C-alpha cells in the first residue's frame, strides 16, 4: 500500500522531476516507510511506501527491470501474488524479491495488458515499456485504489490523490458544473472520469489505459459481471446460496490476511464487520486485534460499544475502544478535509479519520466491512425497489437517494452555475437502462456497486486510512464474491430486511441476538446534528470572504439554514448545510479558487 505519482511527456521534453517531487510530498502520509524516485528522459515516477510485504529494500519502488525493459509503480495489494510468482517461475522468470510489485511487473511482461485478469486484489498501477515508450495504467475491478490524471498538451501526470495532482501545478482548477451538480445531488458521488475540477480526471475502475508515445490513448474495460442468473445455479435452494456465499466470503477474508505484518480488523459491532471477525476466528486466526470507535456526546447516542464489545468477547479478540469528544471532532476536521481525495459529505468521514489515526499506532493493516450494503442489498432503498417496473425505476431510485432535485439547484446555486439539464438523473437513468441486469433490483445493485460504492464508501475508507499510513482491506469487495452476489436472486439478497443471505450466514457463526437487531450506524453526533463548535465552524466557513468571493451559493440561501440548523435535510438524512461547508473547506484547504 503506497502513494504513486509521475509525469510522462509526449513532445520530446524531459519530465518535470520537481513537479513529481511536489506530488510525492503530498502523498507522504500514504507511505511513511520510504520514498523513491526514478526518471528516464520523458518519464518520471515517484513513490511513497507503506511496507506490508517484503519489508526489505528489495521491495522498494519505483521498480525497474532493465532485463525486461519495464519500470513500474504500484499502489495496493495483490493477494494471490505468491501463487502468481510460482506460476511465473514455471515460465522461466527469476525473482529478486518477495514482493507483489515484482510479480505484477513480470505478469505484465508475460501477459501484456491481460495481466490484470490474473490479479486478485486492489491496485492502481502505472508502468512504462522502456523500449517502446508505451505507458500502461490500470485500476482494480471495484476502484478500491484511486488513480487521478491531468493532461496538458505534450504531457500527462498521475497521482494517488487529487490534492497531490493539484500540488504539481498547471492544472485547470475551474470547477466543473456537471461535477458540482453531482456533488450536491448525488451525495458527493462523482462518477469517473469527472472530478470537481475541469483539469483533472480519474481512471475508471476495471480499466486498462494504454498511452502511446505520441499521447494517443485507448481504454479497455476488463471486468463487468452480469447481474443475471446463471445456468449452473439453476435449482439452487436458499441454503445452497448461503453455503456458496459463506465459502466465498471465508476465502475473501482469508486472502486478506496475507501480509508480513499483523492484520487487525475494524469492528463496529454491525453485521458486516462482526461477520468478518467471526470468519477470521473460524479460519484459526489468533491474537486478532479489533478496533471500534464512539463519541462522548452528552444527551446523544454516540456509540455502539455494547455490540462491538459483545462480538469481541464472543470471538475472543484483543479489543480496543476509541472514544472521541466533540472537541476531538472539531480538532480533527482540518486534517479530515485535507485528507479527502475529493470532498465527502458522509458524517462518518471524520470518525474514520480519528479511528485510523489511533489504529495506526497498533497495526498497519486492517480488514473492514465496507461494501456489504452495496453488494448484498443492505440499504433501506433496496427492498422497496425490488418490484418497481423498469420504466419507473430511475425516478424511484432518485427519489430515495439523490439529495436534491434538479429544480432545487436554482434555489441553491448562483445562476452562473446552473445547468439546463439534470446530469445526475441522466447518469442514474443511463446506468439503470444498460443491458446485463435481470431485474430492477439487479440494476440498482449494479449502479450502487459500480458508481456509488466507488466514490463514497470506498473513497472515504482509502482517503482516511491512508492519511494515517493504514492499509484497509475490504473482503466484501473480493472479485469472486461480488461475481457470486451478482448472480444471486435479488429476492434472497433483499430478504429479512436486507442482506438476507449474509444474515443467514451470520446466525451460523454468531449468537442470534447479535444478528437480529436493528441496523446501526456510525454516529458522529456533533456533525450529524450540527451543533456547538462544529456549527460555529460551518457558519464561519460559509460566511467567509473566500466563500462570498467564490459566488457558488446564492447569498440568501445559507442564512436561513444557519438560523435553523437541522430543519432541512435530504432524503438520506444529511443536513443541507454540511455538503456546502465541506465543499468550501476543501476548496480553501487545497487553494482552489
Image (cartoon, rainbow, N blue to C red):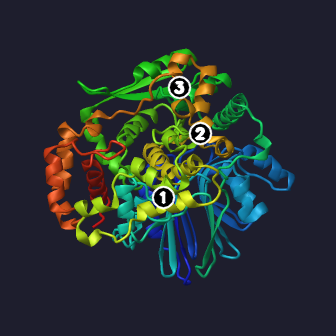
**Residue 475 visible in the picture:** no
- Compared with 200, 442 (above or below) is above
Q: Are marks 3 and 2 in contact (CB under 8 Å)?
A: no
Would you name the residue on which mark 2 appears?
A: 476
Would you name the residue on which mark 1 appears?
A: 428
- Compared with 220, 31 (above or below) is above
- Compared with 442, 62 (above or below) is below
**Place of residue 67 in the rendered image (x, y in percent of width and height, measured from the top left):** 76, 65
- Compared with 277, 1 (above or below) is below
Would you name the residue on which mark 3 appears?
A: 289
Q: How many marks?
A: 3
Say which of 341 and 466 sits in front: 341
- Drawn side of residue 503 relative to residue 558, left or right: right
Label 3 Cα crowd, 10 Å radius (few <14 / some 14-19 / many 20+): many
Q: Quadrant of residue 321?
A: top left
**Place of residue 500 in the rendered image (x, y in percent of width and height, measured from the top left):** 58, 31
Query: Which mark's residue is nearer the viewer, 2 or 1?
Result: 1
Query: Which mark's residue is nearer the viewer, 3 or 1?
Result: 1
Q: Residue at x 47, y 50 (%)?
A: 459
**Residue 255 visible in the picture:** yes
Label 2 Cα crowd, 10 Å radius (few <14 / some 14-19 / many 20+): many
Q: Quadrant of residue 232?
A: top right
Say which of 378 and 112 sits in front: 378
| Mark 3 or mark 2, earlier in chain | 3
| Mark 3 or mark 1, earlier in chain | 3
- Drawn side of residue 340 relative to residue 557, left or right: right
**Place of residue 47 in the rendered image (x, y in percent of width and height, measured from the top left):** 53, 57
Q: Residue at x 55, y 44 (%)?
A: 387
Provide the secondary structure element on which disc 3 rests: strand
| Mark 2 or mark 1, earlier in chain | 1
Amino acid at each position: 500500500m503506497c502513494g504513486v505519482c509521475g509525469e510522462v511527456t509526449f513532445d520530446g521534453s524531459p519530465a518535470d522531476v520537481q513537479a513529481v517531487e511536489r506530488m510525492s510530498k503530498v502523498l507522504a502520509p500514504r507511505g511513511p516507510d520510504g520514498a523513491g524516485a526514478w526518471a528516464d528522459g520523458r518519464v518520471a515516477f515517484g513513490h511513497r511506501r507503506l511496507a506490508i510485504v517484503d519489508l526489505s529494500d528489495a521491495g522498494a519502488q519505483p521498480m525497474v527491470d532493465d532485463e525486461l525493459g519495464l519500470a513500474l509503480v504500484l499502489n495496493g495489494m495483490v493477494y494471490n501474488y505468491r501463487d502468481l510468482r510460482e506460476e511465473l517461475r514455471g515460465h522461466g522468470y527469476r525473482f529478486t524479491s518477495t514482493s507483489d510489485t515484482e510479480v505484477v511487473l513480470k505478469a505484465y511482461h508475460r501477459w501484456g495488458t491481460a495481466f490484470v485478469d490474473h490479479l486478485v486484489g486492489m491496485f492502481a498501477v502505472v508502468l512504462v515499456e522502456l523500449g517502446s515508450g508505451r505507458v500502461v495504467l490500470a485500476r482494480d475491478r471495484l476502484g478500491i485504489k484511486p488513480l487521478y490524471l491531468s493532461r496538458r498538451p505534450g504531457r500527462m501526470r498521475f497521482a494517488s490523490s487529487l490534492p497531490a495532482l493539484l500540488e504539481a501545478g498547471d492544472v485547470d482548477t475551474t470547477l466543473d458544473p456537471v461535477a458540482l451538480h453531482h456533488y450536491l445531488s448525488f451525495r458527493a458521488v462523482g462518477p469517473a472520469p469527472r472530478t470537481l475540477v475541469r483539469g483533472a480526471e480519474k481512471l475508471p475502475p476495471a480499466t486498462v489505459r494504454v498511452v502511446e508515445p505520441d499521447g494517443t490513448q485507448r481504454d479497455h474495460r476488463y471486468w463487468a459481471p452480469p447481474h443475471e442468473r446463471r445456468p449452473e445455479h439453476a435449482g439452487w435452494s436458499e441454503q445452497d446460496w448461503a453455503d456458496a456465499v459463506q465459502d466465498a466470503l471465508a476465502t475473501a477474508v482469508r486472502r486478506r490476511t496475507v501480509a508480513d505484518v499483523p492484520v487487525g480488523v475494524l469492528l463496529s459491532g454491525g453485521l458486516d464487520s462482526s461477520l468478518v471477525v467471526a470468519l477470521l476466528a473460524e479460519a484459526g486466526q489468533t491474537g486478532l486485534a479489533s478496533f471500534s470507535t464512539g463519541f462522548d456526546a452528552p444527551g446523544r447516542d454516540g456509540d455502539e460499544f455494547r455490540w462491538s464489545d459483545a462480538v469481541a468477547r464472543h470471538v475472543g479478540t484483543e479489543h480496543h475502544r476509541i472514544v472521541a469528544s466533540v472537541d476531538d471532532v472539531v480538532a480533527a476536521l482540518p486534517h479530515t478535509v485535507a485528507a479527502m481525495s475529493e470532498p465527502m459529505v458522509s458524517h462518518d468521514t471524520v470518525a474514520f479519520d480519528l479511528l485510523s489515526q489511533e489504529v495506526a499506532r497498533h497495526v498497519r493493516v486492517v480488514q473492514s466491512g465496507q461494501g456489504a450494503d452495496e453488494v448484498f442489498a443492505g440499504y433501506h432503498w433496496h427492498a422497496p425497489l425490488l418490484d418497481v417496473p423498469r420504466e419507473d425505476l430511475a425516478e424511484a431510485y432518485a427519489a430515495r437517494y439523490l439529495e436534491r432535485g434538479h429544480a432545487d439547484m436554482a434555489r441553491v446555486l448562483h445562476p452562473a452555475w446552473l445547468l439546463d439539464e439534470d446530469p445526475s438523473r441522466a447518469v442514474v437513468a443511463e446506468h439503470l437502462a444498460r443491458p446485463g441486469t435481470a431485474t430492477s433490483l439487479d440494476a440498482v445493485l449494479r449502479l450502487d456497486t459500480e458508481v456509488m460504492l466507488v466514490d463514497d464508501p470506498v473513497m472515504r475508507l482509502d482517503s482516511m486510512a491512508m492519511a494515517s499510513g493504514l492499509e484497509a482491506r475490504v473482503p466484501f469487495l473480493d472479485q469472486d464474491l461480488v461475481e457470486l452476489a451478482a448472480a444471486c436472486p435479488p429476492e434472497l439478497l433483499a430478504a429479512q430486511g436486507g442482506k438476507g443471505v449474509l444474515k443467514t450466514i451470520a446466525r451460523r457463526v454468531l449468537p442470534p441476538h447479535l444478528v437480529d437487531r436493528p441496523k446501526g450506524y456510525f454516529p458522529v453526533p456533533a456533525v450529524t446534528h450540527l451543533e456547538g463548535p462544529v456549527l460555529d465552524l460551518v457558519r464561519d466557513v460559509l460566511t467567509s470572504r473566500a466563500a462570498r468571493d467564490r459566488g457558488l451559493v446564492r447569498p440568501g440561501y445559507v442564512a436561513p439554514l444557519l438560523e435553523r440548523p437541522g430543519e432541512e435535510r435530504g432524503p438520506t438524512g444529511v443536513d443541507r448545510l454540511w455538503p456546502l461547508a465541506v465543499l468550501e473547506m476543501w476548496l480553501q484547504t487545497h487553494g482552489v479558487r
